[in-house]
Amino acid sequence: MKKKQLLNLPKLEATDEMMDAALADTPSKEKSKWKDCYRKETYTYKLYLRCCVESGILKVALFLPDVMRTGGRQATYELYISKGEETFLTYDRVASKWRTATLSNIHWPGYFYESDGIFVSREDADEIAGYLGEDKGSYKGLIHYQQGIRDKELEKRHKKETDPWDQDLQQTPPLPKDWQRWLRKVAIPKQYLYYHYKKGGAKTGYCTYCERDVLIQNPRHNKEGRCPHCQHKVTYKSVGKAGFVQSGNFLAYLIQRCRDGVMIREFSVNQVIRKGQYLSPELHHQEIRRTIYDQDFNPRAYYWGLYKQRNFRWMKTNPCNASYYGDEGKVYGKTLPFLAKNQLRMTGLVEWIQNHEIADPEKYLAVYKRIPLIEKVLKAHLPRLTDELYDSWWQSSTRETLTDSSSLTKSLGIDTRKLKQLRDMDGGLLHLSWLQYEKGSGKDIPRDVFEWFIKEQVEPSDLKFIADQMSPLQIRNYLQRQMKELDLDCQVVIGLWADYLSMAKRLKMDTNDEIIYRVRKLRQRHDELAELCRLKASELRADEISEKFPGIHKIFSKLKDKYGYMGESYCVIAPSCVLDIIKEGEALHHCVDTSTQYWERMEQDESYILFCRKNEEPDRPYYTLEIEPDGTIRQKRTEYDRQGKDIHKIQQFLLEWQSVVAKRITQEDRALSEKSAVARQDNFAELSQKRAIIHTGDLAGQRLVDVLQADLMLNKAA
C-alpha cells in the first residue's frame, strides 16, 4: 500500500445519525471502588465506525465520542487494510502520523477501556465482515484480523530461527521396534510382585517384570525380594493394600547413527500402576533432549520446551559441559556393538557404558573432548583411574599429571612395568603420582611404604619440603611415630612438620642438620619456634625485606648527613636500617613498613623515608616523612595515617628544613628529583583514572589522589 494513494481515498466523516447519538450519549461518572482518587467515566458507545472499500482497500474511519460531542466530524484514526497484501496501516489525524500498531495497541482515552458499546451501522458491519471474511464486522472483527496478520508475521520471523533446527533434526532416526518394551524392562528398575492376601499366606503372585504368575512364599506388603522365576529384584505388593503406584522418573538414553555422525537422545520415563490394574501398567515417556555429534565430535544440542511462550517444540540449547553433574540413566544396548566398531570406535564411550550400570553419554563425550587420554586409559583396563579422570578432569593437578602423546605410558609418565603395576593394583591418580615419582627418582619404594602413603592419601607433592633429605621409608617411619605420639592424622602431622621447617628457615637455622629436620618432639619444637617468630617478627620481616631489596642498604648511609637536621623544637632523623622503618610503622600503626612500594622507591632513589621527632623525645616516633631527593615532601603522617592538630607547626618546621636541605643537595640529587617528579605525576594520573577511594580512617570517602596532592610540599628553595 502506498501512503499517498491511501490519503486520496474518499474522506469519511461522521454521519448525522452518529452525531445525534454522540450528543445524546451523556457520559456517566462514578468513583472507583478500589481508588477514591479515580473517577470512572463511561459512554454508551466508546467508538463510532464507518467504512468503505475502494480499489481493493478497506478504509475504516474511527471516531471518538468526546470529539464528536464538541461538533467534530473528522475521524481520529483511519485504518487501511489490504487483504491481498495482508497488511494494514493506521493514520493518526490528530498527530498527522502513520502508525503500524494494531488497534489494541493504539493509545485510547481512559473512558475507552471503561465503556463497551461500538456504534456501527448494519451496512458497514456487513461490509467489514464480508471483506475480512470474519464472523463479526465491528471492532472485534478488525482486532481479530490484525492479530491474525501479526501472528503470521511473528511465525515467519520465528521460522527463520526454527527452520534450520527442524532441518537439522530431520536426520533423527526412528525409534527401535522394541523401544517401549526395553523402557519397561530395563530403563525402569522398579518392578513389583502382586499377590492376593489369603489366610495362611498367599502361594502365588504376578511379577510385572516376567509378566507371569509365579510361586511365592511368605510375602509381605512392601517387602523387597526377588522373583522366584526371573530372579529380578521386586517389591511385594498386596493387591488389597496397594493403591496408585508410581515408579518415579528415570532417564534413558538412546544412541543412534545419523547423517552427520551420532545422535544421543535423552528420555524421561516413568510407569504408573493404578489400583487393581497391575496386569496393564501405564508407561509414560517423553524425549527431552537430542544432541548431534559430527565426525570430530563437535556437539549441537536441542531440547523439548516452550518456545517464545507460544508452543512446545524442539529448540537449540547449549551442549553438555564437562562440569555438568546431572542424573544418569540406562543406555539402550542394541545399537552399541555397531557404533563401537564405527562412529564411536575411538572414543571409549561404549566401553564406558559397559562398565557402568547407569551413565550420561553426553557428559562422557564432554570429558573426552577435554581429556582424550581417557579413552586409552579406559581400554587399558584401568577402571579406577578412568573414573577419577572423569570426576576430576577440571583439577589442574590432574592435567599436570598427564601429557599428550601417542603412547599411553608416555602420556602417563611411566614405563611398561609400572603400567602393569598400576593395572594390577587397580590404581587411580594417587597411585599414578607415586609411580611417576618412582620413575623420576629411579628408585622403587617398598610396597608396604607405597601402600601406606596410598592409605593415608599422601601425595609426593605433599612431601616436597623434606623429600630431598629423607627417603620415603624414613618419612613413613617418622610420620607413623609422630602420629602415634601426637594422636593426630597423617595430613595434620605433615602440615605441622612443613610449618616447623619453614619457621626454622626463617630463623636461619641449619635445616640440613638431621637434628633440626628430624626433630623428635615435633609439636613442642613447632610451638617454640612459633613463639620465637612472634617475638622476632620485626627482625624476621627486616631480613625478608633486605633479601628482597638488597640495594636498599647503601641508601641508608647517605641519608643522615644530607637530610638530618635539628631545629628549635623539632628534628628530622634518618633511619639507619630496615628495622628502624619497620618499628616506626608498628609504633604509628600506618603502612610504611608493610607496603612494598616504599622499599621499591628507596632502592630506586625515587623517594626516602625519614622521621620527624620532637627534640625532647628524639627516640619516640612522631611523624613519618616520605621525601624526594631534593627535599620535596610527598607525605607527612602520624598515627593511623593521620595529621595532628599541630600540623601547621610541623609544616613551618619542614619549610625551614627544606631550606637547609636545598644547600646540601648535589646536581645528581636534582637529576634524581626530576625523575621522581615524573614518577609522582604518573602515579597521580593512575590513581585519578582508577578513582581510588580511601575506605577507612578520618579520610574515608575522599579520593586518594586529592589527599596526596594536598599533602605535597615542593622544595621551592631547591
Image: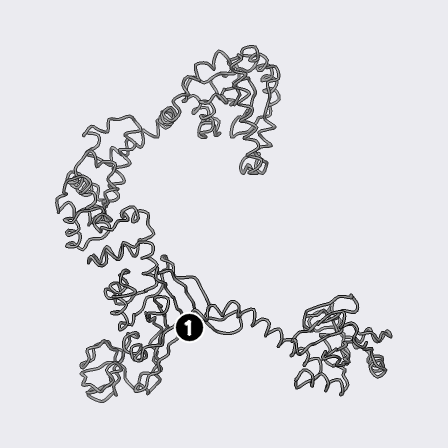
Q: Residues within 10 Å of mark 1 (few under 14, many from 20)?
A: few
Count of numbered circles on the image: 1
| Relative to 670, 133 lies left or right | right
- Of residue 674 and residue 234, the one placed in the foreground of this image is 674
Q: State how the image is colored.
A: one colour
Asked if residue 630 can be seen in this view, the reply is yes
**What residue is shown with label 1?**
170
Q: Is 130 placed left or right of 486 in the picture?
A: right
Q: x, y percentage for residue 87?
A: 66, 74
Name the residue located 55 percent from the left edge and 38 percent from the top edge. Answer: 690
Q: Nearer the viewer, residue 322 or 445?
A: 322
**71 relative to 416 in the view: left or right:** right
Disc 1, SS: loop
In the displayed structure, would residue 285 be above or below residue 502?
below
Task: Give the image location of residue 39, x and y in percent.
Answer: 75, 71
Residue closest to the eye, 631 or 695 = 631
Quadrant including the C terminus: top right
| Residue positioned 73% across, 67% down in the render | 98
What is the three-letter code of the residue carrying label 1? Answer: Gln
Give how far across and how far down residue 691 sits, in percent. 57, 38
- The picture places residue 325, in percent across and down from the top left corner, at 36, 60
Left or right of 356, for residue 676: right
Q: Do we see residue 451 in this rendering?
A: no
Residue placed furthest toward the right: 71
Q: Residue at x 56, y 69 (%)?
A: 157
Q: Quadrant of residue 303?
A: bottom left
Q: Quadrant of residue 377?
A: bottom left
Is 164 drawn above or below residue 65 in the view shown? Answer: above
Depicted 69 relative to depicted 661: above or below: below
